[in-house]
Amino acid sequence: MTHQDIVDPRTGEVYDRVPHASSTQLHDAVRAAATAFDAWRSVTPGERQDALLALAAAIAEQAPRLAAAECRNTGKDYTEVLEAEIPAAVDVLRFMAGAARGVHGPTAGEYVRGHSSLVTREPVGVCALITPWNHPLGSAVDKLAPALAAGNTVVLKPAETTPMSALVLGEICDRVLPPGVVNVVCGDRDTGRALVVNPFTALVSLTGSTRAGAEVTTAAGLAGIKRLHLELGGDAPAIVLADADPAEAADGIVEAAFYNAGQDCTAACRVLVAAEVHDRLVAMLAERAARTAVGPLNNRTHLSRVSAYLEGLPEHATVVTGGTPAPGPGFFFEPTVVTGVRQDDAIVQDEVFGPVLTVQPFTDEDDAIRLANDVPFGLAASVWSRGAGTGERLARRIDAGTVWINCHGVYATEMPHGGFKHSGYGKDLSVYALDSYSRIKHVMSKTT
């Protein structure tokens, strides 16, 4: 049996080992979910609500243990995880516990003379949930909650480098939910591929890179046209108009850019600023970046990847602050601000996924929208302006699933999260998430 060394990103040292699931163990987990599905799908929405509320309570009770596992594995701040990320996960479970009881559809009735129709919402089956290393616990719960609320059973595969909080979550689920409803398997990309093509999985929900999304799409299609829910990469623009409050914009963008060391699909990556206030905003961003403390990147390979973008900058680009790995142990990279970039530069077009901000000037609103939309991704964006209606006007033209106005990275469980273009499709959070994990059936009866 192969094992994965688990590394503390703050020190770069191995502190645990986790075995990879064998092909037999993986198949057994999927079969367990398939066996449990027959009973779980028949549980009433009210009974599922009780189960999910019990799971939420158990997670809240185990919050210190979950936070410790998450932080040691990812390098995140313990207080932040304990006081923000775990309560958010609990809130998602509580919301989904009730959401499945209030789903509405077309009214049953006679739409064809002599025939009655009704519409039912059914669970899909066994859902393969494949989660990323940047938010291991939060991403797992964002998928788990609507999948279970809709009546599905699941097999959860956490990222290879960050399985620890998922294993704790799996233990909690085993104590609260019926056997086989939630199963956790650890492994590498090959494990994930095997889970995708397993004949008993009906849906694959992936949060990861666009490359991973493309691979899953191909494999799932060849394996039987499986349903997909893809939350992929981002390259979020922050458009700062000339009339914006520069201090408010700089504060909000820096926080959104460097949270979790920029390892967030909705992180502010590209600042697009009116040319007349460009230099002032750059100075404010650089000053704030220089005094911002960030956590480590997830692993040594990713540190090398982020470093390569800065080492390979074209001559026309200028690093205003940061730009290099931080000295000392662990996988830290300095908060970085880069100016002089062009739209076709790799650092603009790609998702760097690190504590790196690029800044580009624009001439007018049309130019700003062109720059904002001229990347492969369409997950999130923000607009900063004091003008009444300006934010809403630009938001309608931005090709992204979420647009914030005078803020960035603020979430509400009741509101959907998901992207366009290479950022994937399907929604997390809100009642819209249930659409991905259920199927709609029309039943018609002849009455005369």
Image: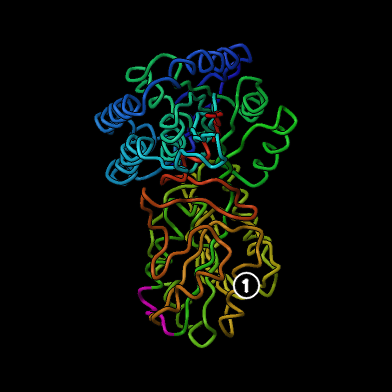
Task: Point out the residue furthest to the bottom here.
Answer: 276
Examine the image and state in which quarter residue 226 appears: top right
Q: Tell me which segment is drawn in magenta.
A: 243-248
Q: Is residue 373 left or right of residue 123?
A: right
Q: Position of residue 64 (x, y in %)?
A: 27, 33
Q: Nearer the viewer, residue 179 or 20?
A: 179
Quadrant where the N terminus sits is top right
Relative to 272, say whether 138 is above or below: above
Where's the C terminus, which quadrant?
top right
Q: Under tag 1, what secondary structure?
A: helix
Vertical position of residue 192 compared to residue 418: above or below? above
The image shows residue 441 at horizontal and vertical percentages of 55, 33
Check disc 1 and give the amino acid type: Leu
Among the 4 quarters of the image, the one containing residue 323 = bottom right
Residue 102: percent from left, percent from top: 36, 39
Dot 1 alpha-carbon crowd within 10 angstroms: few under 14, some 14 to 19, many 20 or more: many
Q: Residue 139: horizontal and vertical position, in percent? A: 46, 39
Mark 1 — residue?
371
